[in-house]
Structures are given as C-alpha cells and as structure tokens.
Image (cartoon, rainbow, N blue to C red):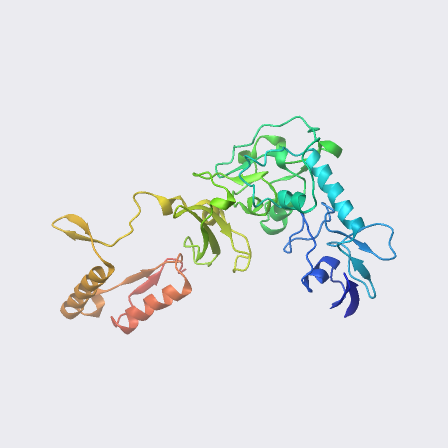
C-alpha cells in the first residue's frame, strides 16, 4: 500500500492504482471525456489532468500511477484554466447546436463546458461539415459532433471484439471511420449499440421512433432482457408511458454491454397489437378476461385432464429465453404437481 494526498485528503491505495482511481476512492470527482473503467486508459482527452507538486506539467490522472508521498491538486486555478482551454479547443470545432440537439441535458461535453464557463460566442468551425451517416438501421453517426475521445473504438475492439471502427487520417483531419468509408452499414458492425451507449456527445445516437429530450423522461425502469437466458439488465427509458430508449445497466451481469436485440429490439413493447390482457375463446371468438378468471380456467381444465388421462397426458418444453429460475419452477411443477418427467429444453444437446 502507498500513501498520498489529494486535495488535502490523505489516501491509501494499492501500488499501481491510477491517480483517478485513488481520487474516486475518497469521493473526489475528476472530470473525464475518454475514460471508462472497463477499458484500458488512453489519456486522449486530457480533461482529467491534475497538478502534482514537483512536476512542471499537468499529469493525466487516468494514466498516471499514484506514487508514495504524492501531493496532488485536482481543483487548483492552474488545473481549472487548463481544462477550460481544452474544452474551448474542442468546442471551437463542435457544432453549436445545443438548442436542437437531442443529447442536450445528458451530454458530457455540454455539462463540462457549463461547469468551466466555456462560452460559445466567437468560435467558428474549422472543418467542412460532413453529411450525417444514417446507413445503419439502428443509429446515426455525426462526425461533426465527434470529439475523438476514442471510447467507441475501444469498446468495439476491447469489449465487443469487432473492431468495426478506427481512427483514420492524421492531425487535424483525424476522424472516426470504418473500412473504406462506405458507411457504418457496410462495415463489420453488429449493431450492438455499445458505442452509442458510451459516446459522450451526440456523435452516435440511436434512431428512435419518438423524439425526446432528457427532461421529457418520466422515469427509468430496471428490468431483465427477455430475448435469452443470460439475464442482461436493462434500464427502460419511459416517456408518456412508452419505452423510448433502452440503456444497458452498468451494475448488471452484462456490465453495461448489450446485443442488438437487447439495445434496439423494443418496438414490440409499444405495438398496438401487443396483448395486454388474457384472452378466453368462447364460441370461436376471443374476449378479454381478468388474470384470476383466466388462471382459474386453466387450472380447472388441467385438473380435468389429469383426472381423466393421468400424468402422461402432460408435457412441457422449456425455453433458453427464460431465466434459470423460471425453468426451475416449470420442471418443479411438471415433476411435483403433474407427476411426470415429460419436460424438455430447447438448448438440450
């Protein structure tokens, strides 16, 4: 263990811990644009720079390991001035569209510019504006709003294992792109949306059926993805009692990652033909019923079949889309109540 001081607070951490993580351990927030705990630190944005006594240069806290006896300042005038200047340089080449941008209110760049007093006046864009890439069916890519933090590239490569996007060109012409620059739909992208999830600006945005801003969100509902049995945790974003977006939960088994189904396959939830009540067929016509009525009917019919034909008249087929708990209860019902081993599973080899 090593001891150091951050903003006057004594900190004790394991050797090899970064300054950023050391600060987090004592609830000191250091702003970042390119950092993600799941990724290898890159130090690309430099927003996390801190002042280390005895060092002439500000140090990127995400890539600099803490050392014994360090005295660190994360909020000094020098640090604040440097962060403001970096944000001004980013904003200088960023579209000033906050009034109409769908990311407004949950944009990390916007929040930091507000915190450090960056003014939009006087900045003229340096690059020629590029067309919006809408080739992917699930998300859009606006290169003009990209700040080159590299999170999308690293998530795609390090976590998703696809490497569908990369940095191309050099110097001021550097940009995020895909092989041969034919559009995201023509790359090796699997449309998992994990790059969209980590983007700190509106460079990568999901295609939604309904436009909304962060202040339109009524609530977020934690749930489990029903597409398979992995148990990925989702946060359903609700507006007007409808699901308008799905976010991956960082504290779930999926650790903030999803596949294309979990991230974008939610339109059925709001579909007009979705069944919301049990239906009972009478005279060849379905009618709505309460859950109590429907379950009583099913239980009664099952009892009749059991009394007339015995346990072998029943069989069940479990699904990999159900949780382990659901499958356990199903086999328990078949073996314990209906006294039969006629149960199988779609994933059995």
Identify the image quadrant of the C terminus: bottom left
Position above or below: 129 against 101:
above
Question: Is residue 67 something one can see in this rendering?
Answer: yes
Q: Is residue 150 visible?
A: no
Nearer to the camera, 149 or 120:
120
Residue at the extreme top of the image, as rendered? 128
Percent from the top left, x then y, of residue 182? 58, 30
48 relative position to 259: left or right: right
Image position, residue 88 (x, y; %)? 72, 38
Q: Does residue 324 appear to the left or right of 307 in the view shown?
A: right
Q: Is residue 212 above or below residue 52?
A: above
Quarter of the image with the N terminus is bottom right
Q: 228 or 47: which is nearer to us?
A: 47
Residue found at x 67% / y 35%: 120
Residue 336 location (% of width, % of height): 29, 73
Residue drawn where x is 34% and y is 68% of the image: 329
Answer above or below: position of 337 versus 283: below
Q: Establish if 47 lies above or below 14.
A: above
**What is the total number of numbered labels drawn onto the structure image?**
0
Tell me which residue sits at (62%, 36%) in the image.
145
Residue, far left: 283
Image spot of residue 51 (x, y percent): 81, 54
């Amino acid at each position: 263990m090593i001891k150091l001081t951050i903003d006057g607070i004594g900190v004790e951490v394991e050797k090899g811990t970064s300054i950023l993580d050391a600060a987090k351990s004592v609830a000191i927030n250091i702003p970042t644009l390119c950092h993600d705990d799941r990724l290898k630190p890159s130090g690309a944005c430099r927003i996390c720079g801190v002042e280390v006594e005895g060092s002439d240069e500000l140090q990127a806290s995400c890539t600099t390991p803490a050392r014994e006896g360090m005295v660190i300042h994360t909020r000094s005038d020098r640090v604040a001035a440097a962060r403001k200047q970096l944000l001004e340089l980013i904003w200088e080449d960023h579209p000033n569209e906050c009034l109409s941008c769908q990311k407004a209110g949950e944009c990390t760049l916007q929040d930091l510019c507000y915190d450090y007093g960056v003014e939009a006046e006087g900045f003229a864009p340096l690059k020629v504006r590029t067309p919006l890439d809408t080739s992917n069916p699930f998300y859009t890519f606006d290169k003009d709003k990209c700040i080159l933090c590299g999170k999308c590239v690293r998530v795609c490569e390090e976590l998703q294992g696809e490497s569908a996007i990369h940095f191309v060109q050099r110097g001021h012409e550097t940009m995020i792109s895909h092989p041969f620059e034919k559009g995201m739909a023509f790359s090796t992208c699997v449309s998992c949306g994990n790059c969209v999830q980590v983007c700190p600006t509106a460079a990568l945005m999901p295609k939604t059926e309904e436009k909304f801003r962060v202040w339109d969100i009524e609530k977020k509902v934690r749930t489990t993805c029903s597409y398979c049995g992995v148990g990925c945790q989702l946060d359903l974003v609700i507006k007007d009692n409808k699901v308008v977006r799905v976010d991956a939960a960082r504290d779930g088994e999926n650790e903030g990652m999803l596949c294309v189904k979990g991230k974008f396959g939610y339109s059925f939830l709001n579909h007009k033909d979705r069944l919301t009540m049990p239906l009972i067929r009478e005279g060849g016509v379905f009618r709505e019923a309460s859950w109590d009525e429907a379950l009583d009917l099913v239980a009664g019919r099952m009892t009749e079949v059991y009394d007339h034909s015995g346990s072998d008249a029943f069989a069940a087929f479990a699904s990999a889309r159900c949780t382990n708990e659901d499958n356990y209860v199903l086999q328990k019902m078949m073996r314990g109540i209906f006294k039969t081993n006629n149960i199988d599973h779609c994933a059995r080899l």
